Image (tube, rainbow, N blue to C red):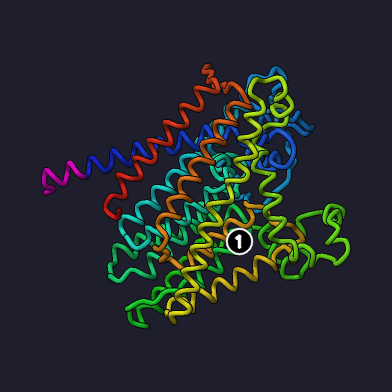
Amino acid sequence: MLSGSYQLSLIKRLSLTGTLFLALTLLFFFSAFGFQNFTADAHSYYASEILCSDSIDRSYCSPSPQADIRLFRGSSDEPKQIQDYGAEYFSKPFAMLLNRLLDKDDTLRTATVKIFFAKAGLSALLIIYSLGLTRRFPWLKHLAIHLAICFFCLPYSLFALAGYYPASISSLGIFAGVLTLRAYFENPKVSRGDDVYLLTALSLLTLLITTTRFETSVMFSIMVFLVPITIVSSQSLTLRRKRFASVVVVCLLAGGPALALSPIARGTLSQFAAGTAKILPRDVADRSVVVAKIGDVGFSVLAPVTLIDNSSRNIGEQFANEAQEQLSTKTNSSLALTIDYGIRFLAWTPLFIIFGIYGLTLWRNIRAKSQSSKGAAMVALVFLFLFFFVPYVARTPWFFWYVLPLFICILASHGYNQRFPRLRRVASGTVLLVNLASLVTTNYLLGDLIIANFVLSPLTQSLLAISLIIVSLLGIHQLTQRVS
């Protein structure tokens, strides 16, 4: 029978977890309404894949193009339908799963609210699961902090988690996945309960990753095989081999069928194997002077430049075009623009700090001839090669959502970056400032948010976001006190 003190501790922990789950879910849910529009342009394809992926005749699916106007912002021309492109992408299985949440009589607004809330809840679960790992396996704390800084350094991640675009939630899956891999391989205790829990979680995370994004699936597959060589453990060779075999079998059973049964996945893999894969049309690719002169190698040569350029410009794209055009008629518009460009500048600072810490730590360990540094250096070289090779093979410049899984894998290859605590605090504070400023600016630019019969002014939205962030941070602090 459980003691009274244990029961109180369990109740307190459950209430904290529930409060944190609710706060994170609401934060991601409301942030999604500030992300890029989905009734036209690129993201409308992913929205159509989710909303119109079944054979049911839904009232909000239309064969004709729709106006590029944001929903929930009170526009009289707000579209009631979305174009059904009939296109399928790598995320088709995940889209079909989300589609099951919808009813035949749902409107476009109702369907959108359902999808946003479901993805926000799933994102909150992934973060709480990752926090649970750092509590159960304290040595993961510093790695988790670095991964969180990398993941949230650009506001894109916060805005996109609950939206229709699947890249952000897939990257969050690999975030939790690499923590699970390191916890499983580094756990010095042979505990059947821990092993079953971690392998079960790993199978679910693998299923999420392999049904959402191609590039994330590839990076995670590589990481499964490379993580063991980065870990120096006191475990016997037999146990290490057994755990590696268990991970490979679980990942194959969980992700293998999703890849093998998907014609889109098979087609994508065959295109990359044959060297015929392409993301950008030829005419778009040739707009680059370097690419036009030296060929597709130009994508590799300019990989770092295009990453910073494209991603920096995209940071501001969650601000609607119509809102940008109206800036001249708004008071304090110059202040909003200053904040916008300030966000774009500051957003890269935490990433440079974290990778600077990673590089210095790895270099010191190599000079000290640390055994763990050999494997980490090898993994870093593999992913550095991929950073320059993938743009050449895929014929595309880097964007943050493409490269984020690769960055996560690089950081996860060396899990003990405990040095430079002050720099880490600066990076964490900058991430918080950038996301908060981006939320407030986006709310100001887009105006009132209208959901059902509730009208939230920009001030109300901003105060709500600040409150949810504070509650989330307090909940994270309380739940991780054991490893603090």
Question: What percent of the width, then of the height, locates residue 326?
Answer: 72, 23
- Residue drawn at x 30%, y 58% as measured from the top left: 136
- Residue drawn at x 66%, y 31% as measured from the top left: 58
**Closest to the observer: 410 or 430?**
430
Question: What percent of the width, then of the height, locates residue 181?
Answer: 43, 65
**Closest to the observer: 210 or 142?**
142
Indicate the secondary structure of the residue bearing disc 1.
helix
Residue extent of the magenta highlight:
1-9
Question: What percent of the width, then of the height, locates residue 399?
Answer: 67, 53
**300 to the left or right of 482:** right
Give neighbour class at mark 1: few <14, some 14-19, many 20+ (Cα, 10 Å): many
Please name the predominant secondary structure of the magenta segment in the image: helix
The answer to whether residue 107 shows anywhere in this view is no
**Closest to the observer: 260 or 459?**
459
Does the stretch in magenta take in 406?
no
Q: Quadrant of residue 140?
A: bottom left
- Residue drawn at x 60%, y 73% as measured from the top left: 382
Q: Is residue 246 above or below residue 43?
A: below
Q: Quadrant of residue 271?
A: bottom right
Question: What percent of the width, then of the height, locates residue 172?
Answer: 51, 51
Which residue is denoted by mark 1 in the rendering? Answer: 259
**246 to the left or right of 81:** left
Does the stretch in magenta take in 5?
yes
The answer to whether residue 172 shows anywhere in this view is yes
**469 to the left or right of 60:** left
Identity, as a three-letter code, of the amino acid under mark 1: Leu
- Residue drawn at x 65%, y 20% as measured from the top left: 331
**225 to the left or right of 143:** right
